[in-house]
Amino acid sequence: MKKIRFGLTGSGYMGRTHAEAIKHLSASGELVAIWGGTRAAALAARCGAACEPTLEALMQRKDIDAVIITTPHQCHFKEVMLALENGKHVLIEKPMATKLEDCDQMLAAAKKRGLVTAVAHNLRFRINLPKMRELIKSNALGDIQSMHFSMIRQLANAGNFGGNKTGWVNQPETVGFVIDGLPHGVDAMRWATGAEVTRVAGFSRTYTPDRPIEDTTVGIMEFSNGAVCSVHTTIASHGFFAGEMARLIICGSKGSLDMDGFGDMHFTDREKGWRLISNQPPVMADDPESAYKVGRMQAFYDQMQAFIDRINGKPSEVATGEDGRAGLAACLAMLTSTRENRLVPLT
């Protein structure tokens, strides 16, 4: 298997996360160079990588096979297109972009050049969601009837573990929290059930003082398997709600699942009632360095290896560019529904 040489854009919370993942996988990956952000030089020194002065210099390096994109949402399109034009595979932090037409251009450019596009949906690589998917595939839940996904956070802690996102997440160019948080939920439901979002209705609001863009969305989705889903995402909470950082509930004709993406998952049916079936070790938000310890990082190690596997033509569960586009489409449809006061079809 070919060892993949990486470049990285962005040096904040997620930049360091992916840098640490590559460092962990020294047998299959190597971080060559970093560009972007005030912490780029320090992160590069920490990882034994070069710090490039410009985006173009990073992308033009001949010793880089793939680039990880961890900059603000509105920067993704330019950086991804430049990477693809220079023959690099890309792993993009969600959301894939801020516009569907940008996603389409990325996908077309990658297809033309035979390159891999992937989107970082790390819930696929944690403990609970794969177990949920396994149970659904085994028909333990029967026919999927309804679902609920919630992500409740505080704006003041949007960049927890020492990051500082409160500046750029307030900019109109980032569109809103719905495309930052909800893509994880859409991908989780699509990946676990194998169904696609077909129609969306949303109610988006802004409650945070002086914030020019959406911070709260409540909505409904219909899926191709007939299931209906409610969603609740907000960054205007006054505190963290236990179990609501990434909670997914799925009800079926034979059984139901209640998953805390960062805690316990329970299953119930008519015969035995509720019981614990799996557990994801928590990430302690009050300890900045815990963000880079195995409890949180194992999913990123596995995701990075899955991306490397995909590049090398091996089977992989890393989310594709098409998956990233599907998640963004459902989230943007929530905003369209709010703006135009209508149900929005996606197929």
Image (spheres, rainbow, N blue to C red):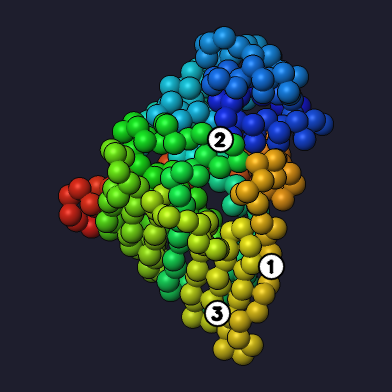
Name the disc covering residue 278, or none.
1
Residue type marked 1: Ser
Q: Going from the N terminus, do you reach mark 3 or mark 2 first?
A: 2
Nearest to the eye among marks 1 and 3: give it: 1
- Most distant residue in the right direction: 27
Determine the residue positioned at 59% across, 59% down: 261
Q: Are marks 1 and 3 in contact (CB under 8 Å)?
A: no
Q: Are marks 1 and 2 in contact (CB under 8 Å)?
A: no
Residue type marked 2: Gly
* Residue 17 image point, x, y percent: 64, 36
Helix, strand or loop under label 2: loop
Above or below, 104 against 135 in this view is above
Q: Going from the N terminus, do you reach mark 1 or mark 3 first?
A: 3
Name the disc covering residue 255, or none.
3
Q: Compare residues 65 and 129 and report the one nearer the observer.
A: 129
Determine the residue positioned at 50% across, 50% down: 184
Above or below, 93 against 294 in this view is above
Determine the residue positioned at 57% across, 66% down: 259
Helix, strand or loop under label 1: strand
